[in-house]
Image (cartoon, grey):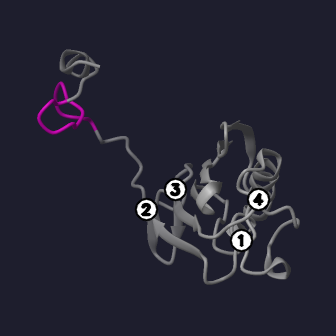
């Protein structure tokens, strides 16, 4: 895409911010902190944020080349998080590796795997009532099958010291 095309889309080429044609009328806007606001922002502990973002890195994982297992892990994690699955698309690479995305009403789960080195990278973002967390994402990187908050069809059987899960508020 050229800079001219970005300009046509209303982007400020210097900052990347949207270009405004004039002042925005905010007189009818409902504050994001309002309790009766109807959106999918999360309001918790006096804070308002767009959603929960998890990055799950699987190290020394197994099953990372199994497309059906990855798809089932998506389904299990969606169920454990209380999310709404809209669509799953995966692609199996030759000679190895799987990439995929689960499109959710609340946002997405994506994965890219490198089974030749036992590595998988899951990216999860959910808003609204869905509750992703280390427990629900144990489907992707279980520390122990008994603690997995889903069915036992986990995408990677990794030990607690080989799976790292980071959570942040967006």
Marks 3/1: CA–CA distance: 25 Å
Q: Position of residue 140 (x, y in %)?
A: 70, 63
Q: Is residue 18 left or right of residue 102?
A: left
Q: Say which label, 2 or 1, has the lower sequence index.
A: 2
Provide the residue designation for mark 2: 33
Marks 2/4: CA–CA distance: 43 Å
Marks 2/1: CA–CA distance: 32 Å
Provide the residue designation for mark 3: 41
- Label 1: element kind: helix
Provide the residue designation for mark 1: 138
Provide the residue designation for mark 4: 63
Q: Residues within 10 Å of mark 4 (few under 14, many from 20)?
A: some
The residue mark sitting in front, 4 or 3, is 4
Q: Is residue 15 magenta?
A: yes
Q: Are marks 2 and 4 in contact (CB under 8 Å)?
A: no
Q: Residues within 10 Å of mark 2 (few under 14, many from 20)?
A: some
- Label 2: element kind: loop
Q: Say which label, 3 or 1, has the lower sequence index.
A: 3
- Between 141 and 106, which is closer to the camera in this rendering? 141
Residue range (magenta) = 12-25
Q: Position of residue 55 (x, y in %)?
A: 53, 63
The residue mark sitting in front, 2 or 4, is 4
Q: Position of residue 15 (x, y in %)?
A: 15, 39
Q: Are marks 2 and 1 in contact (CB under 8 Å)?
A: no
Q: Say which label, 4 or 1, has the lower sequence index.
A: 4
Q: Residues within 10 Å of mark 3 (few under 14, many from 20)?
A: some
Q: Say which label, 3 or 2, has the lower sequence index.
A: 2
Q: Position of residue 168 (x, y in %)?
A: 46, 69
């Amino acid at each position: 895409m050229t800079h001219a095309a970005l300009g046509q889309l209303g982007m400020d080429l210097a900052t990347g911010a949207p270009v405004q044609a004039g002042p925005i009328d905010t007189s009818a806007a409902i504050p994001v902190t309002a309790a009766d606001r109807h959106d999918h922002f999360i309001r918790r502990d006096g804070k308002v944020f767009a959603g929960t973002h998890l990055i799950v890195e699987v190290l020394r994982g197994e099953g990372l080349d199994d497309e059906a297992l990855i798809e089932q892990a998506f389904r299990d994690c969606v169920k454990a998080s209380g999310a709404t699955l809209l669509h799953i698309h995966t692609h199996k690479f030759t000679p190895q590796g799987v990439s995929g995305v689960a499109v959710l009403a609340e946002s997405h789960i994506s994965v890219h795997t490198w089974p030749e080195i036992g590595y998988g990278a899951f990216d999860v973002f959910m808003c609204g009532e869905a509750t992703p967390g280390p427990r629900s994402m144990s489907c992707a990187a279980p520390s122990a099958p008994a603690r997995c908050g889903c069915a036992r069809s986990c995408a990677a059987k990794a030990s607690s010291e080989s799976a790292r899960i980071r959570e942040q508020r967006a």
